[in-house]
């Protein structure tokens, strides 16, 4: 099986130093991470806050281009600046300029060759399902609501086949531009606490809507709409129709991004592997 294609990093901007920050956001009111012409994105809001703070037209680079309505706890973002603001003060300074649904959690100086997206060695996503007769007034923006009772044991039994390195071509939504659909999943865990089902998926990289397709298929398996071996069938055949729905964006969170040390200090980011 082929590996992920080699990455060519952009050259750092001369005369600047590079800062890395970790950003958390509620994606409900945004058209995703990436700046867009006709809609408000998290990247735009963060860049406007940096311009207000530093007076520079800074372009930020995120570790993941989350979709509209998707949330983040551990979005890692780098930018180049000539500002003398200490890196560890950016959270305090930026949070005074940002709306309440975007928070900068940590900041550090990083080598100018480091790239938040291309140096990521893996990511962990969390998907939350609220399984109850009625949707939650409080958590509606952070979960997917399923009113029909889900079969937890059936769902759990379907997951182990996803572990390891496979061709996940059936797990990519139309519009995906990946050069290869080979991916490695290192962990796929499902837990249930009361009405809350929590899926956590960790892998080296993910295809467009891959986690939402896994979550949606899991819901359909739990409701008995599709066979318990749907994931295995899709891996064997490459057929998207073997899988279930693409789950709503509201339940998805980019939880953690992994980098190899010594690029990021464990004590500050807690995200090295």
Image: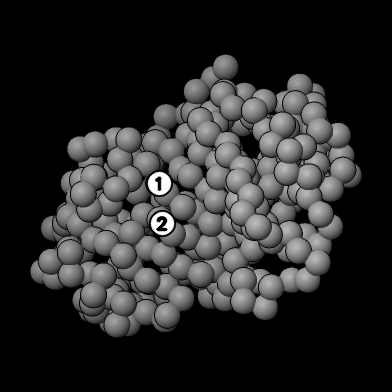
Of 189 and 7, nearer the camera is 189
Label 2 sits on a secondary structure element that is strand
> Is residue 234 shown to the viewer in this render?
no
Using the image, determine if residue 207 lies above or below residue 141: above
Neighbor class of circle 2 (other Cα within 10 Å; few <14, some 14-19, many 20+) is: many
Using the image, determine if residue 187 lies above or below residue 52: above
* Residue 272 in the figure: left or right of residue 18: right
Label 1 sits on a secondary structure element that is strand
Of 214 and 2, nearer the camera is 214
* Residue 151 in the figure: left or right of residue 124: right
* Residue 34 in the figure: left or right of residue 131: left
Image location of residue 169, percent across then percent down: 69, 32
The quarter in which the N terminus is drawn is top right
Identify which residue is drawn at 20% across, 37% down. Answer: 262
Using the image, determine if residue 167 lies above or below residue 173: above
Hey, which residue is sitting farthest top in the picture? 1
Image location of residue 41, percent across then percent down: 51, 70
Would you name the residue on which mark 2 appears? 75
């Amino acid at each position: 099986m082929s590996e992920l294609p080699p990455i060519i990093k952009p050259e750092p901007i001369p005369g600047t130093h590079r800062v890395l920050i970790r950003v958390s956001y509620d994606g409900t009111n945004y058209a995703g991470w990436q700046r867009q012409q006709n809609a408000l994105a998290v990247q735009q809001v963060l860049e406007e806050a940096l311009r207000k703070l530093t007076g520079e037209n800074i372009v930020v680079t995120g570790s993941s281009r989350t979709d509209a309505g998707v949330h983040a706890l551990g979005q890692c973002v780098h930018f180049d600046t000539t500002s003398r603001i200490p890196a560890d003060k950016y959270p305090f300074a930026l949070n005074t300029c940002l709306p309440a649904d975007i928070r900068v959690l940590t900041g550090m100086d990083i080598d100018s060759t480091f790239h938040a997206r291309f140096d990521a060695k893996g990511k962990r996503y969390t998907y939350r399902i609220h399984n109850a007769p009625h949707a939650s007034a409080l958590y509606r923006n952070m979960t997917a609501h399923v009113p029909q009772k889900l079969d937890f044991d059936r769902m759990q039994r379907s997951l182990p086949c996803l572990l390891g390195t496979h061709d996940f071509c059936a797990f990519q939504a139309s519009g995906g531009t990946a050069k290869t659909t080979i991916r490695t999943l290192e962990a796929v865990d499902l837990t249930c606490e009361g009405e809350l089902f929590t899926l956590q998926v960790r892998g080296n990289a993910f295809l467009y809507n891959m986690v939402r397709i896994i979550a949606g298929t899991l819901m359909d398996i739990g409701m008995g709409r599709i066979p318990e071996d749907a994931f295995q069938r899709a891996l064997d055949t490459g057929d998207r129709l073997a899988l279930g729905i693409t789950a709503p964006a509201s339940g998805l969170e980019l939880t953690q991004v992994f980098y190899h040390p010594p690029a990021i200090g464990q004590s500050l980011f807690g995200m090295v592997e």
